[in-house]
Image (cartoon, rainbow, N blue to C red):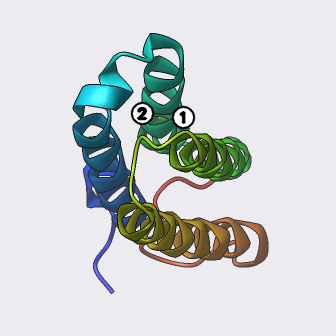
Amino acid sequence: MATIQRFEDLIAWQKARALARDVYLLTRDEAFRKDFGLASQIQRAAVSVMANLAEGYERRRRVEFHRYVEIAKASCAEVSSHLYVALDVGYLESSRFETLQEQISELQRILAGLKGSLSSEPRASGLGPRN
């Protein structure tokens, strides 16, 4: 396993970046972009996932990184919840909703694994910061 040198090397961050991109593309759609409140909220939640991973990694303390991974995981749930609203009011079709929810589920699994490894493996290599 390659050693993680920067937050950009984290698979979780890369997946979070893709999610943020897809959320921004979604909120550019005609109907969605007129709902400034929901569009802004879902964008902020998506960006929060990747930002918390970056910030937590850069704090260089295992316990802090773990906490920020938890926050990122919670922000994923927030994105998921907002997608239900968007689906219910007709801003996206069910197929696009399902694709985004699958993307979020994959990211949630990756974050759960990262969180678990930060909790249980004090000397594991390739995971970045340690306290």
5 horizontally vs 62: left or right:
left
Q: Position of residue 3 (x, y in %)?
A: 32, 71
Name which residue type carries label 2. Val
Circle 1: element type: loop
Q: Nearer the viewer, residue 103 or 39?
A: 39
Q: Position of residue 55 (x, y in %)?
A: 49, 33
Q: Is residue 28 visible?
A: no
Image quarter of residue 56: top right
Name the residue located 23 percent from the left edge and 28 percent from the top edge.
Answer: 30
Name which residue type carries label 1. Arg
Q: Residues within 10 Å of mark 2 (few under 14, many from 20)?
A: many
Q: Residue furthest bottom?
A: 1
Q: Residues within 10 Å of mark 1 (few under 14, many from 20)?
A: some
46 horizontally vs 61: left or right:
left
* Mark with earlier residue (2, 1): 2
Name the residue located 74 percent from the left edge and 48 percent from the top edge.
Answer: 63
Q: Residue furthest front?
A: 90
| Residue at mark 2 to residue at mark 1: CA–CA distance | 18 Å
**Pointer 2 with pointer 1, Cβ within 8 A:** no
Locate the N terminus and report the quarter of the image it occupies: bottom left
Identify the residue under disc 2. Answer: 47
Q: Is residue 26 visible?
A: yes
Comparing labels 2 and 1, the label whose residue is closer to the camera: 2
Q: Nearer the viewer, residue 40 or 34?
A: 34
Name the residue located 29 percent from the left edge and 41 percent from the top edge.
Answer: 26
Q: Position of residue 59 (x, y in %)?
A: 54, 34
Identify the residue under disc 1. Answer: 59
Circle 2: element type: helix
Name the residue located 38 percent from the left edge and 70 percent from the top edge.
Answer: 95
Count of numbered tags: 2
Q: Can you say whether 78 is above or below 107 in the image?
A: above
